[in-house]
């Protein structure tokens, strides 16, 4: 029996697919939670409604950084993307992302197993319950032996 804790190459093309440890790892793969997408306020050229007024900017600076809930930065407008300064909180954001990946729930959804394949099919109503539907021939076009391409 191969040891589960032994290191292995992630991108190795010569992986033995018959190894039970590898099959187990592939079967119970849980995708990571998606990264939160940036909002309009985080744009380098946000709309005027996302830009704070002078009073809002001063109130934002007075609140301690650990007491802020959603707004962790103050939106600013730049003329071009090359004028945007380096993001100061890159390391902190990467660290929080790593914590999110580490603390992701490990729930797996077990597929239902059906003993009888007929359980997968829905119960269909009887044709009498589906009325009204056409019971008589409404139109019949005569005179054509081949397919009609246009009228």
Image: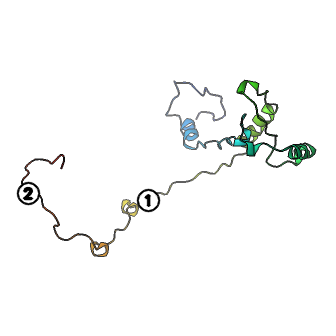
Q: Helix or strand or loop: what does disc 2 sit on?
A: loop
- Characterize the local packing of mark 1: few (<14), some (14-19) or many (20 or more) Cα atoms within 10 angstroms: few
Residue in front for this viewpoint, 68 or 80: 80
Q: For mark 1, give the secondary structure.
A: loop
Which one is in front in this view, the residue at disc 1 or the one at disc 2?
Answer: 2
The answer, for residue 39, to whether it is visible in the render is no
- Tell me which residue sits at (71%, 27%) in the image: 81
Q: Position of residue 97 (x, y in %)?
A: 73, 39
Q: Is residue 78 visible?
A: yes
Report the residue at 59% width, 33% height from top: 2
Q: Marks 2 and 1: in contact by CB < 8 Å?
A: no
Outermost residue toward the bottom in this view: 128
Which residue: 71% across, 41% down?
47
Label 1 sits on residue: 114
Task: Reply above or below: 20 against 122.
Answer: above
State which tag comes first along the sequence, 1 or 2: 1
Residue under numbered circle 2: 142
Question: Which image quadrant: the N terminus?
Answer: top right
* Residue at the (20%, 71%) spot, across then down: 135
The image shows residue 95, relative to residue 116, as above or below, that is above
Q: CA distance from mark 1 to mark 2?
A: 51 Å
Left or right: 118 as drawn, with respect to 40: left
């Amino acid at each position: 029996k191969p040891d589960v804790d032994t290191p292995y190459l992630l991108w190795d093309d010569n992986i033995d697919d018959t190894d039970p440890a590898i099959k187990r790892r592939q079967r119970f793969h849980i995708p990571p939670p998606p990264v939160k997408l940036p909002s309009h306020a985080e744009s380098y050229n946000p709309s005027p409604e996302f830009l704070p007024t002078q009073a809002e900017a001063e109130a934002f600076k007075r609140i301690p950084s650990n007491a802020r809930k959603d707004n962790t930065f103050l939106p600013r407008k730049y003329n071009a993307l090359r004028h945007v300064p380096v993001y100061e909180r890159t390391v902190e954001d990467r660290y929080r992302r790593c914590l999110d990946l580490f603390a992701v729930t490990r729930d797996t959804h077990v597929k239902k197993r059906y003993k009888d394949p007929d359980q997968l099919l829905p119960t269909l109503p009887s044709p009498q319950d589906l009325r009204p539907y056409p019971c008589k021939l409404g139109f019949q076009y005569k005179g054509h032996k081949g397919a009609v391409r246009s009228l």
